[in-house]
Image (cartoon, helix red, strand yellow):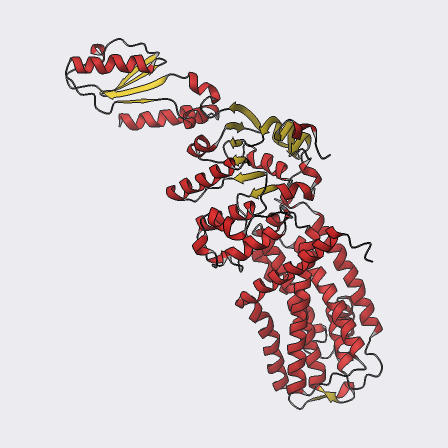
């Protein structure tokens, strides 16, 4: 391991680390972006939880509605901070020429991407802590040691899939102004059939089958499995993990395709 | 690879028969030139002449479709990090991480380089000292441009590409930027400049090349390009009342014209001609209003070379007649 870590590579990892700090500083300083990414899912959480106060889900053995909805909102918040943020952010960096400027510096392109992903992981950590913290404090969900592996693996794979997809999808966004519309178009309709706001039980089977192909449903379902009081074992849901893993692979390929293109030639 | 042919020759840039086509369109059609180390080289040309394509090939942003290019002895298309360590780039329009301050950005971009200049020294150099803790988003256009320069300089590059560096500057800020760029030359840096401003090229460049339609149509020192030093000078003055052009002494001139009472003489011997005219005026005790002697400016030569010269003059004259 230490043989692989040449001084040059060690320096590059140091650069990535520092770049993460710069990305973080820039992220939290932009109030409009930082706050809204957090506030949006939390408002949904409070509103939906209040609307359904005391409800139980009979199709799921009478578990409290909050045990379904808090992990669903966590999935939504994760997608907002990874896929949505990354895609819109990359489109802006591209259109404003920041990526081009960075490409002219000695910082390797992979290091810049790694730093942006690293920064995103920190933000995912923050939104997970806030959502689950509020869930535990106000909505009676329980974080169980037994299902922690399921929670961690699902969050990691979800972050990997949606972050790489967010970078990769930039290729299909013609300009930064179109980015929010296009990105929300790929997310919002799917959330309605992906077990985030409503349980899939009772939905037309076709819609449920469609949702299962895309990564939102497996992320939400995987997290809901973790917080379902009936779950025994590690909290890992094989089918969800498999779909998320496939989408991670797709995301990585899409990201590499986006990164391989020389930026000057795009103009 | 460490000491290549062109590097030992003291060349910063070497371009041979460089070509770039986009499908059917040939944007750069076989361009050749060299830039010596420590030289300020300026590429001029109208929009669409192939300037930016040429510069971006040298910066490594675009891939050439023919010919050869060497920048500091390396192929810019290879995208080598060693080359990026030694080259600073100010792009024509280029954003920056808006939420970071001037000082943070200069520090951040400096860290990308193995060797970098002290942050505050660079900020002072581009005169952003008072703005060091202001976010990039809150800078004016001119300040933003100076930040661009700072970010290109913080890595202490040997070669700096400046693509229209002073566009949007007020005259005072432009002068300031010029002196900054001049100071880079004193440090032995090579500067590759493109600009729309002829006075900028005149003031800064050791040599200029004029591009048109993807070709370099003239190259040389600003005061010699296009035979500028060999062109006749223009002597202008107003005829005193009650005198005619025939009364003016027959000075050595290759052309003379009268427009109202304004006389224009074209002469290859401006000193002699001026002496004869002024002594004639003194002898006859008459005033010569608006007396001037002018060599053709770089702009005159540029407009002529790029094919806009004649049009320009015609419009000037119609204005005078009116």
Residue B287 image-quadrant placement:
top left
Residue in the image at 61% along x and 77% along y: A42
Front in this rendered view, residue A111 or A206:
A111
Residue situated furthest bottom in the rendering: A54
Q: Is residue A169 visible?
A: no
User: In front: B198, or A193?
Assistant: B198
**Badge count:** 0
**x and y percentages locating residue B90 in the rendered image:** 54, 43
- At horizontal 67% and vertical 83% (from top left) the residue drawn is A135
- In screen coordinates, is B285 left or right of B235? left
Q: Identify which residue, A184 or A82, lies in the foreground.
A: A82
Q: In the image shown, does B188 or A204 lie closer to the viewer?
A: B188
Vertical placement of residue B141 versus A165, above or below: above
Relative side of B111 to A260, left or right: left
Residue sitting at 70 percent across and 73 percent down? A75
Picture layout, residue A248 above or below residue B204: below
Q: Position of residue B234 (x, y in %)?
A: 33, 19
Position of B263 relative to A259 (above/below): above
Which of the 4 image quadrants contains residue A72? bottom right
Q: Quadrant of residue A144?
A: bottom right
Residue A250 image offset from top left, x and y in percent: 77, 59
Where A192 sits versus A90, above or below?
Answer: below
**Res. B224 visible in picture:** yes
Which quadrant of the rendered structure holds the C terminus of chain B?
A: top left
Quarter of the picture containing the N terminus of chain B is top right
| Image coordinates for residue B188, horizontal then vertical, percent | 54, 35
Task: Judge left or right: residue A112 versus residue B134.
Answer: right
């Amino acid at each position: 391991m230490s043989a692989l870590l040449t001084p040059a590579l060690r320096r590059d990892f140091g650069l990535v680390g520092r770049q993460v700090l710069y990305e973080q500083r820039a992220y939290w300083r932009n109030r409009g972006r930082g706050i809204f990414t957090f506030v949006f899912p939390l408002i949904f959480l409070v509103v939906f939880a209040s609307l359904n106060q005391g409800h139980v889900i009979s199709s799921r053995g009478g578990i409290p509605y909050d045990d379904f909805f808090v992990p669903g909102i966590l999935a939504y918040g994760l997608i907002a901070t990874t896929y949505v943020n990354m895609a819109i952010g990359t489109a802006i960096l591209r259109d404003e020429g920041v990526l081009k400027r960075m490409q002219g510096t000695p910082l390797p392109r992979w290091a810049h991407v790694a730093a942006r992903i690293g920064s995103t992981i920190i933000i995912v950590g923050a939104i997970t802590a806030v959502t689950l913290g509020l869930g535990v404090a106000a909505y009676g969900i329980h974080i169980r040691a037994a299902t922690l592996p399921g929670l961690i693996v699902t969050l990691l794979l979800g972050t990997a899939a949606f972050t790489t997809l967010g970078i990769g999808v930039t290729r299909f966004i013609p300009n930064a102004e179109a980015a929010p519309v296009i990105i929300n178009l790929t997310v919002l309709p799917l959330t309605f059939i992906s077990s985030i706001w409503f349980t899939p039980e009772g939905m037309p089977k076709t819609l449920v089958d469609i949702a299962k192909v895309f990564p939102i449903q497996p992320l939400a379902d995987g997290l809901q499995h973790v917080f379902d009081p009936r779950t025994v074992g590690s909290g890992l849901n094989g089918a969800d993990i498999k779909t998320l893993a496939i989408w991670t692979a797709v995301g990585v390929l899409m990201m590499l395709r986006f990164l391989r293109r020389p930026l000057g030639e795009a103009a | 690879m460490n000491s290549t042919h062109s590097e030992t020759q003291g060349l910063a840039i070497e371009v041979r028969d460089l070509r770039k086509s986009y499908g059917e369109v040939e944007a750069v059609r076989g361009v050749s030139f060299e830039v010596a180390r420590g030289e300020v080289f300026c590429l001029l040309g109208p929009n669409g002449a192939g300037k930016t394509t040429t510069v971006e090939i040298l910066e490594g942003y675009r891939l050439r479709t023919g010919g050869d290019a060497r920048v500091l002895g390396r192929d810019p298309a290879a995208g080598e990090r060693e080359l990026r360590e030694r080259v600073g780039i100010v792009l024509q329009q280029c954003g920056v991480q808006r939420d970071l301050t001037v000082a943070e950005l200069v520090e951040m971009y400096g860290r990308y380089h193995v060797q970098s200049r002290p942050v505050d020294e660079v900020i002072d150099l581009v005169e952003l000292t008072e703005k060091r803790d202001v976010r990039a988003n809150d800078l004016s256009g001119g300040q933003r441009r100076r930040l661009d320069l700072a970010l290109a300089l913080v890595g202490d590059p040997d070669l700096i590409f400046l693509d229209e560096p002073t566009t949007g500057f007020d005259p005072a800020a432009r002068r300031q930027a010029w002196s900054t760029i001049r100071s880079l030359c004193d440090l032995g840096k090579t500067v590759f400049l493109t600009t729309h401003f002829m006075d900028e090229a005149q003031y800064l460049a050791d040599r200029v090349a004029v591009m048109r339609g993807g070709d370099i149509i003239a190259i040389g020192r600003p005061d010699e390009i296009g035979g500028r030093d060999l062109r006749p000078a223009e002597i202008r003055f107003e005829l005193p009342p009650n005198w005619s052009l025939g009364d003016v002494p027959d000075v050595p001139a290759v052309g003379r014209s009268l427009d109202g009472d304004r006389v224009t003489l074209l002469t290859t011997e401006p000193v002699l001609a001026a002496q004869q005219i002024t002594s004639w005026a003194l002898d006859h005790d008459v005033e010569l209003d608006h007396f001037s002697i002018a060599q053709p400016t770089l702009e005159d030569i540029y407009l002529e070379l790029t094919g806009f010269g004649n049009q320009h003059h015609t419009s000037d004259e119609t204005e005078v007649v009116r």
